[in-house]
Amino acid sequence: MAIEKISPSTNGGTHVAPLDASKLVVNLAKTLKPLVPSEDLIFGETKTDHMLVVSYEPATGWSAPEIKPYGPLNLDPASSCFQYCPNVFEGMKAYLGPNGEPRLFRPDKNMERLSRSVERVALPPFDTSVLLELIKRLVMVEARWIPSEPGHSLYIRPTVIGTRAALGVAASDSAIIYVIVTPAGPYFRGSVKGIPLLAVGESVRSWPGGTGGHKLGLNYAPGFLPQRIAAKQGYSQILWLLGDDAKITEAGAMNFFAVARRDDGDLDIVTPPLDGTILPGLTRASCLALLDGHTQGRLTLPGIALTQRLYTHERTLTMSEIAAWSADGKLLEAFGVGTAVIVAPVGRIGWEGKDLVLPSEETGLGPVGKALWERIVDIQVGKVEWEGWSVSCV
Ligand SMILES: *Cc1c(COP(=O)(O)O)cnc(C)c1O
């Protein structure tokens, strides 16, 4: 006998409305806000004119999605999202293409990850390809907010929250999806130099069997206190370690890469494996694919010799290994990657009372980091076409 899967449109046999882009209602703001000059943008602070909102109730299903003026949500104080944190989000960006058309970067990957996050905290499921249609509509409505300067973009924050208005500790059977957008300049403005990281193992960001591999809101608040302590010591982010052998997991909310020179002159590029403690970043996956593409001769990374072999490894990487490479002069680069920063150079790593200094301390991104940054940006803005990664909203 086939096991019936619970689909978004069934609820114990009762038919409820699925998420439906054709029901979209657009209520435009009467007056539009003035645009903020690009040089004044602070990440995530500027709110645009509109947002997308749609809600789910177990009796009726998904409401008609609405694009409406940006503003507060009206929620019952007992709502699950305020108590038990069944809250998930995504981070993606829209860029202007060669003909001024808004483009997204591998948005299907964000939607797949969102779907997994929603499932992990038992929120009502929905067809994320429909949400992607709605996000494209919102981006088109807000297109005037996409800054055109290189390295700038419109950051998109799809969010799903549980809105069950009762204190019983249980999965939220109602939910709201909302999407807000905010114009963004380069994440680390003005600092081309490497960032200082403090390696921390006493508090951990994730653990085996935990939720670090999902983009859940509840993963982030516990990192704020250690982050503040690191900042007081002059480090801008934490390098999160795990276990007695000081395994490197992530840097702040970025995936981590280290580049080491081999005796034969080839390069080893190592990033920790997706074992459930690492957030499966799109930028991480894109970097690995581009590096492999270079070594296989399917593409050339700018500034890297065709003959330079770049061997990628998704494997455990410990602090002692990094320290040994550094002592032997083999550690060429380390960088953090993510949608917000794309590629951010690591300048030094504080560990066991000492600072391990990298070449990027003074020079910023090394050749590999710089090549990845440039190639990813070229693909994002549609200058270089690569495997359909850049998707037009038009
Ligand atoms: C979002 C995020 C990343 C980066 O993922 P991208 O898909 O590349 O933006 C890495 N680590 C953490 C903890 C994150 O939340």
Image (cartoon, helix red, strand yellow):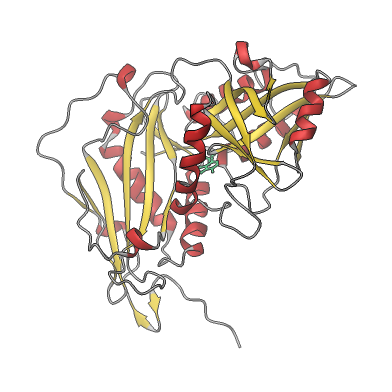
Q: Residue furthest bottom?
A: 1
Classify 368 as above or below 119: above
Q: Residue furthest top?
A: 362
Give the residue at x 21% y 43%: 70
Residue 180, by quadrant, is top left
Where does residue 310 sit, x and y in percent of width and height?
A: 77, 28
- Looking at the picture, tell me which residue is in the foreground, 191 or 135: 191
Where does residue 148 sit, x and y in percent of width and height?
A: 36, 21
Classify 382 as above or below 370: below
Where does residue 147 sit, x and y in percent of width and height?
A: 34, 24
User: In the shown orientation, is residue 305 left or right of residue 111?
Assistant: right
Q: Residue furthest front?
A: 353
User: In the shown orientation, is residue 327 left or right of residue 86?
Assistant: right
Give the residue at x 40% y 77%: 10
Q: Give the quadrant of the C terminus.
A: top left
Q: Give the quadrant of the N terminus.
A: bottom right
Q: Is residue 184 visible?
A: yes
Classify 211 as above or below 151: below
- The mark tally for this picture is 0
Q: Is residue 296 visible?
A: no
User: In the shown orientation, is residue 278 left or right of residue 307?
Assistant: left
Give the residue at x 49% y 57%: 117
Q: Residue furthest left?
A: 30
- Looking at the picture, tell me which residue is in the foreground, 156 or 224: 224
Where does residue 320 sit, x and y in percent of width and height?
A: 78, 34
